[in-house]
Amino acid sequence: MNPEERARLAESQMLNDESLRGDLDDTAAQPLLNWAVIRARRLAMKTVAMSEADGDYYFEMANPLLRRAVRKINKIGGGLPGGSAESILPELEAIIQSAIQLPDLLAIPSGDVPALATELSSLSPADAVNKLITMLTLQE
């Protein structure tokens, strides 16, 4: 598969997987999907200089990690309002573990996770999603 084919596949997977947005209303889901598609396409395009085998390997490793992070963001946002910091904390930790392994994501420092979980528990779904995707996005 070439990089553009990987990018199209990644975009299709992001847009067609209900588990990546199903817990959110459209207001919260759309920014998450937009962000996810951009990140997925960037992961795919990182394979431009790689051999086909190396590119396939990289993409097959990275894309599920990104999808896992998106799924967890969906779950956090879907539990709001009313979600507790205790229920958000394991989801945040899973997002961090995925982000650590992805070069285009900024992992949230683990020391700040309990405070972030508490903060997220007081936000609307859309605000929580936006906060998480903003925090995970490396400044370019």
Image (spheres, rainbow, N blue to C red):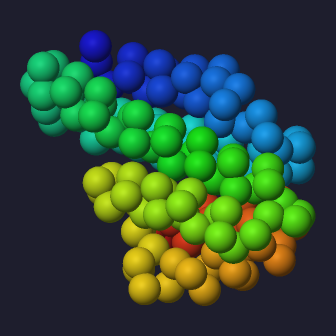
Q: Residue 61 or 115: which is nearer the viewer? A: 115
Placement of the C terminus among the 4 image quadrants: bottom left
Residue 104 seen anywhere in this rendered image of the structure: no
In the current view of this chain or complex, which residue is farthest to the top? 1
Q: Quadrant of residue 2?
A: top left
Q: Residue 22 or 14: which is nearer the viewer? A: 22
Residue at horizontal 79 percent and vertical 41 percent from the top: 23
Placement of the N terminus among the 4 image quadrants: top left
Describe residue 23's horizontal placement relative to residue 34 as left or right.
right
- Determine whether 85 is above or below 1 in the image: below
Residue at horizontal 54 percent and vertical 61 percent from the top: 90
Give the x, y percent position of residue 112.
50, 85
Q: Residue 35 or 88: which is nearer the viewer? A: 88
Describe residue 89's horizontal placement relative to residue 96 as left or right.
right
Q: Quadrant of residue 119?
A: bottom right
Q: Residue 8 or 121: which is nearer the viewer? A: 121
Give the x, y percent position of residue 82.
87, 65
In the current view of this chain or complex, which residue is farthest to the front? 86
- Determine whether 131 is above or below 95 in the image: below
- Determine whether 81 is above or below 60 in the image: below
Give the x, y percent position of residue 60.
29, 27
Residue at horizontal 16 percent and vertical 35 percent from the top: 49
Q: Quadrant of residue 45?
A: top left
Residue at horizontal 12 percent and vertical 20 percent from the top: 53
- Determine whether 23 is above or below 99 in the image: above
Describe residue 49's horizontal placement relative to residue 75 as left or right.
left
Describe residue 70's horizontal placement relative to residue 4 as left or right.
right
